Amino acid sequence: MNSEQIKKYNFSMRIMHWIVGIFVIVQLAGGFFMKDIELSLQPSIYSLHKSIGVLIGLLCIVRIANRLNSSIPSPHQSISSFERFTSRIGVFLLYAGMFVMPISGYLMSIYYGYQVLFFGIGLPLIVETNNEIASIFSKIHSTTAIIFLGIISLHFLSTIKHILVDKVNILKRIT
Ligand code: HEM
Ligand code: HEM
């Protein structure tokens, strides 16, 4: 085991990581499967997908504001400079995914002319219906979903690598 003591993220960052993380994983899994669900259930599932998606967007604004006001623990001494560099890119892409997904989903829906209901509350239809623009946001939404899933998988695998190969339980930093 590496001897340096594990430094933790502060409580609010740890709690935000897991709340947003779980919602994102549920949302990605639900998103990929919802078009195969029985037709009669689809309106309520799509509506739930949109509400949770907007909630994730709002939570991410809080999360970014919280991050900007928090001190980030320095990486563990066993992390190489190459890994520090790739982890910075990874963190940037994870945050980018957390914003691009809700924004593209919202814009896709309203450009198709569907008002988004946030758990029953109607959100503004700020644009005129335009199917061409809507299909661009639809492509952005589905392509980003695949890239986001790939980055989350690498994020998960790198945590496992640090624990099993480097014998440093970096999970303690975020739990
Ligand atoms: C699958 C389960 C997950 C595990 C085991 C996990 C593990 C971790 C660990 C150990 C860290 C701390 C890294 C360090 O600084 O040493 C971390 C940070 C982070 N995780 Fe996860 N994570 C998971 C899911 C997610 C998901 C789904 C997202 C995206 C929505 C995410 C986004 C982040 C971000 C952005 C950070 C960096 C925090 C910051 O510096 O602001 N994680 N994660
Ligand atoms: C972090 C937030 C979100 C995630 C992770 C997510 C994920 C996904 C995924 C994986 C799909 C399936 C894509 C495919 O089949 O290729 C999807 C589809 C969809 N999402 Fe999201 N989504 C999010 C937010 C939103 C929001 C906020 C809205 C609308 C307000 C939305 C509306 C839709 C719609 C309407 C579809 C169906 C598109 C179609 O069938 O062409 N999503 N989403």
Image (cartoon, rainbow, N blue to C red):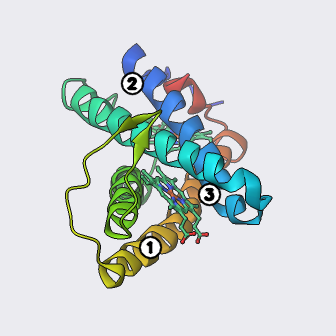
Q: Which residue is mark 2?
A: 13
Q: Nearer the viewer, mark 2 or mark 3?
A: 3
The location of residue 98, given as percent across then percent down, is 40, 50
Q: Which residue is mark 3?
A: 31
| Residue lying furthest top | 11
The location of residue 159, given as percent across then percent down, is 60, 44
Residue 75 shows in this picture: no
Say whether mark 3 is within 8 Å of ligand 2. Answer: yes
Residue 104 shows in this picture: yes
User: Residue drawn 26% across and 26% down?
Assistant: 66
Say whether mark 2 is within 8 Å of ligand 1. Answer: yes
**Tags 2 and 1 in contact by the CB under 8 Å rule?**
no
Say whether mark 1 is within 8 Å of ligand 2. Answer: yes
Distance (Cα) linking label 2 and label 3: 26 Å
Q: Nearer the viewer, residue 151 or 163?
A: 151
Q: Nearer the viewer, residue 122 or 3?
A: 122
User: Regarding mark 1 in the picture, which secondary structure is present there?
Assistant: helix
Q: On the rendered image, what quadrant is the C terminus found in?
A: top right
Distance (Cα) linking label 1 and label 3: 12 Å
User: Residue drawn 37% across and 73% down?
Assistant: 137
Q: How many marks?
A: 3
User: Residue drawn 20% across and 56% down?
Assistant: 126
Q: Which residue type carries mark 3?
A: Gly
Q: Which residue type carries mark 1?
A: Ser
Categorize mark 2 by other alpha carbons within 10 Å: few (<14), some (14-19), many (20+).
Answer: some
Q: Is residue 154 left or right of residue 33?
A: left
Q: Which residue is mark 1?
A: 138
Q: Is residue 114 above or below residue 143?
A: above
